[in-house]
Image: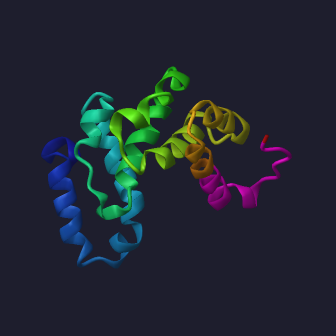
Amino acid sequence: MVNSKGPEETFKKMKSDLLNSQILKSTCHSLTYIVGNAVLEKYNYDVKKAISHTDLLYGGGYIHGVIEYFLKNSKYPEKEIATLCDQIKNLYCPHGLGHGFMLYNKYKVEPSLNLCKKSRLSVKTSTLLEYLWKYWIPKIQITSLS
């Protein structure tokens, strides 16, 4: 739908469907990641253009999706992260970086933490650690975070 109707119409349809679907209510945050991925691709990885269509109804899932997909497909994420959140000036950007670091590194913790350290803003470390705590810490043994 993103390709044929655009992000605004996609969100409008999701909001309409949200009223009638318990499944959509429980998965809408995750679904907006997919919408973010699709919009970024539609706009040839122009993050600013993709972010300009933000809809915060879904708790930043859309922004997380745009940023994670951008970093996952980046050849040089170290260069991208230095200014990415400054450019788009969005509250949900740092958390999206955490997702992007993990995707870029194929869910390997240590390289993701290293990218996090290079990102300059300490809030990014905490959002990556939040992601790790929720999804990965119960599954792995980390010997050192320093």
Q: Is residue 51 above or below residue 14?
A: above
Q: Which residues are magenta?
A: 129-145
* Residue 100 at x, y percent in the picture: 51, 40
Q: What colouring style does the render use?
A: rainbow
Residue 141 in magenta?
yes
Q: Is residue 135 left or right of residue 58?
A: right
Q: Is residue 34 above or below residue 19?
A: above
* Residue 57 at x, y percent in the picture: 29, 63
Q: Is residue 67 left or right of residue 101?
A: left
- At a point 60% along the width and 54% down the height, the residue shown is 131
* Residue 139 at x, y percent in the picture: 74, 57
Query: Which one is in front, 144 or 137?
Result: 144
Q: Is residue 131 above or below residue 101?
A: below
- At a point 56% along the width and 47% down the height, the residue shown is 123
Q: Is residue 66 left or right of residue 11?
A: right
- At a point 57% along the width and 33% down the height, the residue shown is 120
